[in-house]
Amino acid sequence: MNYCANKVLHSGGCEIGPRPIDMHIKALRKMGVRVHDAHHGFLYCEVERLKGCDIQLDFPSVGATENIMLAGVFSEGETIIRQAAKEPEIVDLQNFLKAMGANVSGAGTSVIKIIGTSKKLNNVEHKVISDRIVAGTYLTAAGITGGDLTLKNVSAEHINSVISYLRDSGCRINVKKNSLHIYGPARPKAIDVIRTLPYPGFPTDMQSQFVSVLSIARGTSIIVETIFDNRYKHVEELLRMGADIKLEGSLAVIKGVKKLTGANVYARDLRGGAALVVAALAAEGTTVIHGTKHIDRGYEDIEEKFKSVGALIKREK
C-alpha cells in the first residue's frame, strides 16, 4: 500500500482579503487525506491512498479546482468536481494532463470528471497559454494613454469581458486570430458599472487597472468588487496622483479628472502595483513607484516592455 506524508506552508500571496484554503482541505479530506495543523504556520498532510469522490465546491475557486484535478489523477476511481472554476487556465491544465495520459474531461464547464490511474504519466512538451491578465494590463495602458498598440500571441476569447469594457470606454480594438490591435481614445469615457465576477465575467485581477483608466475618464464610473474585500489599496495611491475616488464598502465611485500628476506612490499588491504603472504612464510629471517586488511577481521586465513601445520608464536599483 502506498503511503505519503508531507509538510506544507499555509498559503501566501497578496494581502487582498481573506483567502481561505478550507475548500482545498475539505476536498482533500474527502479524498482520504489526513490534514493536521502543525507548528509555525505549517500543515501536515498524510495519506495511504487517494480515493475518488464527488466534490461540490462552495465557490468556483481556481486553485481548489486545480488541486482537486491533480489529486484526482492518481486517485482510486472517479473524482467529480461540481461548481468548478471555468478559467482558461483550467482548460490548459486539462490539456496538459491529457497529453500526459491522464483521463480528465469537462474543463471549461462547471463539472469536471477525473478517472484516476495507477500508471506513470508520460513526459510531454506543453506550451502554456499566454497570461490574459498581463495582456489586459497592456491593453489598459494603451487605453489610458491614447496609445496605438499591437499584442501578439494572445487569445481574445480569454479576455472578452476586458475587451468589451475597453470598447465601452472609447477604445477601438481589432481582433485577429492570435493578436489584438488597440487604439486608445484621446480621453476615456466613463463606464456606468463594472462588477467583478468569476470567469467568464470581468476578472477581479483587472479591477485595479480599470480604476486607473477610469480615473481620467469623462464622467463618473462605478466598480463593484465582489471577489475580495481588501482590493482597493491602490486607491489611496491614486488619490496622491490627483484622482477623485470614493470608496463605499465594495463600491468604488470614480469621478474622472482631466489629468493625473506624478507622485511618490507605493505598490501594496501585485495588480494594484500594475495599476500604478498604468496610471503613471498617463500622469503629468514623474511618478516614483516603490514596492516593485509585488509587480515583479506577475510581470516579467514590465519596464522593458513599456520602454520598447515608447514609455519613459526605468528601474532604479
Image (spheres, rainbow, N blue to C red):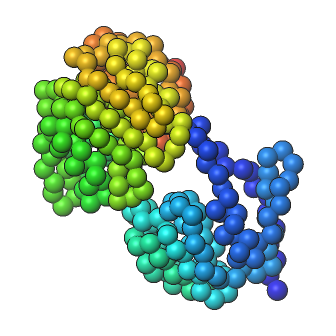
Question: Taking the image as drawn, is residue 307 in sight?
Answer: no
| Residue at (22% x, 32% y) in the render | 190
Q: Quadrant of the N terminus?
A: bottom right
Most distant residue in the front direction: 248
| Residue at (30% x, 16% y) in the render | 260
Q: Is residue 132 above or below residue 194?
A: below
Q: Position of residue 212 (x, y in %)?
A: 33, 29
130 displayed left or right of 269: left
Q: Position of residue 216 (x, y in %)?
A: 25, 23
Question: Hey, which quadrant is residue 315 in on the image?
Answer: top left
| Residue at (16% x, 54% y) in the render | 175
Q: Is residue 133 above or below residue 286?
A: below
Q: Position of residue 313 (x, y in %)?
A: 34, 22
54 displayed left or right of 305: right
| Residue at (74% x, 71% y) in the render | 29
Question: Hey, which quadrant is residue 67 in on the image?
Answer: bottom right
Most distant residue in the right direction: 39
Question: Hey, which quadrant is residue 273 in on the image?
Answer: top left
Of residue 219 and residue 212, the one placed in the foreground of this image is: 219
